[in-house]
Amino acid sequence: MTDNMNLTRAQFDEVMVPNYAPAAVIPVRGEGSRVWDQQGTEYVDFAGGIAVNCLGHCHPALVAALKEQGEKLWHLSNTMTNEPALALATKLVESTFAERIYFANSGAEANEAALKLARRYAIDNFGEHKVEVIAFDKAFHGRTFFTVSVGGQAAYSDGFGPKPAGITHLPFNDIAALEAAVSDNTCAIMLEPLQGEGGIINGDPEFLRAVRRLADKHNALVIFDEVQSGMGRTGELFAYMGTEIVPDILTSAKALGGGFPIAAMLTTTKIASHLKVGTHGSTYGGNPLACAIGNAVMDVVNTSEVLDGVKRREQLFRDGLAGINEKYHVFSEVRGKGLLLGAVLNEQYAGRSRDFLNAAVAEGLLVLMAGANVVRFTPSLVIPEADISEGLARFERAVAKVTA
């Protein structure tokens, strides 16, 4: 048996496929918004597992749900339903525009289901020609071959042979390009209302209205990928609630399980009816263990206390980053909403987001990148204000070192 005391970063290079380049640090324990590595060094966590750990590490409500369900029932298969799945689906229906829920394990799977549903709905109703998916540059929708092809970053989809056909990419927030592209062949317009991996870019209100208007005009569906922006991240349960439009299909994952893998596709009864028995499925999707934890997440996050708290915390981050920038002049702007924020590096520091990330780790702080020019912050939605202050102090020291 492998001795945990002897597990090192070097072993990653011996036993893992090299598609990741993890940091030298190996965290072993977390509590709230702090984590500790093998040497006992403490870090403030502003990364949140890439917007996944919405209630921090080892939140008591999630630990309790895991323990309780872990002693009851883990998995059945979809030849039977289960109580946690029914409870979570009911909560999602009661809290959103949706009337029907499909569960999966990851954002990519939820998006794959959304795209297949949109195609099936269009073909059933309007004919075989109506299969075009319109998506946007810099978008990210997952790593399955369909979702990575719909995502607007060719670097992730090139090199694997012929891509799925019928996908058109447009500049994000460009209404004229959208008007020119949408046609009666379009089955869906897919977008993140707030682009995450692409650099923390908000969808302009006028652009979002145009998406809805043009989709309606051409009998196309609007798919909102809220894998990163959803579950309280923007201060609303889902980001669409802070816009003037409602999608036809919405996908959720990441924070839905607070760290446990689960995803969901939300839609209406009319659209859902086109995924008849046998048309799509997932072995683990909707398993009782994941859904029990998802229920606990919903019960905590979907409260005014947490959602209003996100907006207060956003202001603390914005004020703190503004103070740092007054001294060191590294950012051109801070983009995003709620606790999905991106500090955009100015021309002098363009392309150096990894330098800031590495400097932060050396100061005991975990942050993220959203491309080479953006330092991204996606902390716990309930991060204590003292941890925000301490983390920003550590970030300031990191910025000072990079600029020196």
Image: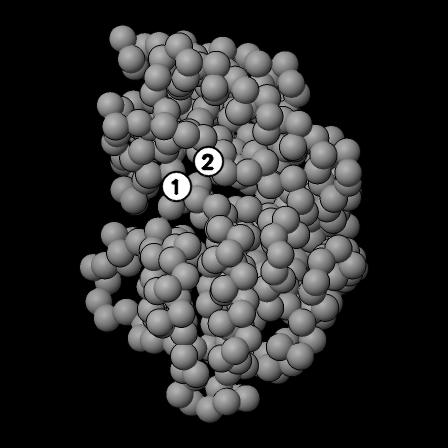
Q: Mark 2: give few (<14), some (14-19) or many (20+) Cα within 10 Å.
A: some
For the residue pair 153 and 90, the one nearer the viewer reads as 153
For the residue pair 224 and 20, the one nearer the viewer reads as 224
* Amino acid marked by disc 2: Arg
For label 2, the SS is strand
* Amino acid marked by disc 1: Gly
Does the image show residue 103? no
What is the total number of numbered labels drawn onto the structure image? 2
Q: Residue 126: where, in percent of width, then height?
A: 50, 89
Q: What residue is pinned by disc 1?
A: 199
For label 1, the SS is loop
What quarter of the picture does the C terminus occupy?
top left
Q: Residue at x 50, y 38 (%)?
A: 336
Q: Residue at x 55, y 23 (%)?
A: 317
Q: Residue 242: where, in percent of width, then height?
A: 63, 49
Single out the mark in the foreground, 1 or 2. 2
Residues at marks 1 and 2, CA–CA distance in whole angstroms: 8 Å
Callout 1–callout 2 Cβ contact below 8 Å: yes
Q: Residue at x 32, y 10 (%)?
A: 401
For the residue pair 55 and 36, the one nearer the viewer reads as 55
Q: Mark 1: give few (<14), some (14-19) or many (20+) Cα within 10 Å.
A: many
Tell me the tag on residue 335.
Answer: 2
Q: Residue 136: where, in percent of width, then height?
A: 38, 59
